[in-house]
Amino acid sequence: SSTVPKGVIIFCHGSGDSGPGVQNYVEALTSPSTLLELESRGIQFRYPTAQRRPYRLMGGLKSTVWFDRYGGMDPKNPEDTPSVLNSVEQLHQLIKEYIEQGVPSGKIC
């Protein structure tokens, strides 16, 4: 019933934010005419929200983060691998759904 997009742009939010939050941010920084032009050319935008999970940097409180990490924000500190893999699976599922609709994988970013 709906038209298959020609391409898809997936925006992932920052720690503690949400899909609608990053959508507001993107729309505030991008001219409406640019977004409308892309949409008129068949480009669809998606703004998924990460799962709520305990986040060590917030003392273990649950937050919408794509992955957890050990020991703070320093890039030398390791990520929590299972949480990374969980988010990768969430994003792969979203991409798979578009591919099944007929969107070429090279047109999803």
Image (tube, rainbow, N blue to C red):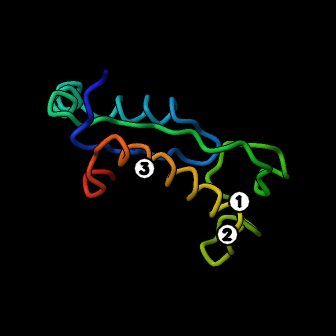
Mark number for residue 84? none
Image spot of residue 29 (x, y percent): 32, 35
For disc 3, the marked residue is 95
For disc 2, the marked residue is 79
* Upstream in sequence: badge 2 or badge 1: 1
In the figure, is residue 25 to the left or right of 50? left
Question: Nearer the viewer's eye, disc 3 or disc 2?
Answer: 3
Whether residues under marks 1 and 3 lie with C-beta atoms below 8 angstroms apart, the answer is no
Image spot of residue 16 (x, y percent): 65, 42
In the rendered structure, which amino acid carries the disc numbered 1?
Asp
Distance between mark 1 and mark 3 Cα atoms: 22 Å
| Near-viewer residue (42 or 60) | 42
* Upstream in sequence: badge 3 or badge 2: 2
Distance between mark 3 and mark 2 Cα atoms: 23 Å
Give neighbour class at mark 1: few <14, some 14-19, many 20+ (Cα, 10 Å): many
In the rendered structure, which amino acid carries the disc numbered 3?
Ile
Residue 26's place in the image compared with 51, above or below, is above
Q: Residue at x 20, y 26 (%)?
A: 36
| Near-viewer residue (71 or 64) | 64
Whether residues under marks 2 and 1 lie with C-beta atoms below 8 angstroms apart, the answer is yes
Mark number for residue 68? 1
In the figure, is residue 87 to the left or right of 92? right
Image spot of residue 87 (x, y percent): 60, 55
User: Which quadrant of the structure image shows residue 80?
Assistant: bottom right
In the rendered structure, which amino acid carries the disc numbered 2?
Glu
Which quadrant does the N terminus fall into?
top left
* Upstream in sequence: badge 1 or badge 3: 1
Q: Residue at x 26, y 36 (%)?
A: 5
Give neighbour class at mark 2: few <14, some 14-19, many 20+ (Cα, 10 Å): some
In the figure, is residue 63 to the left or right of 4? right
Q: Assign a secondary structure to mark 1.
A: loop
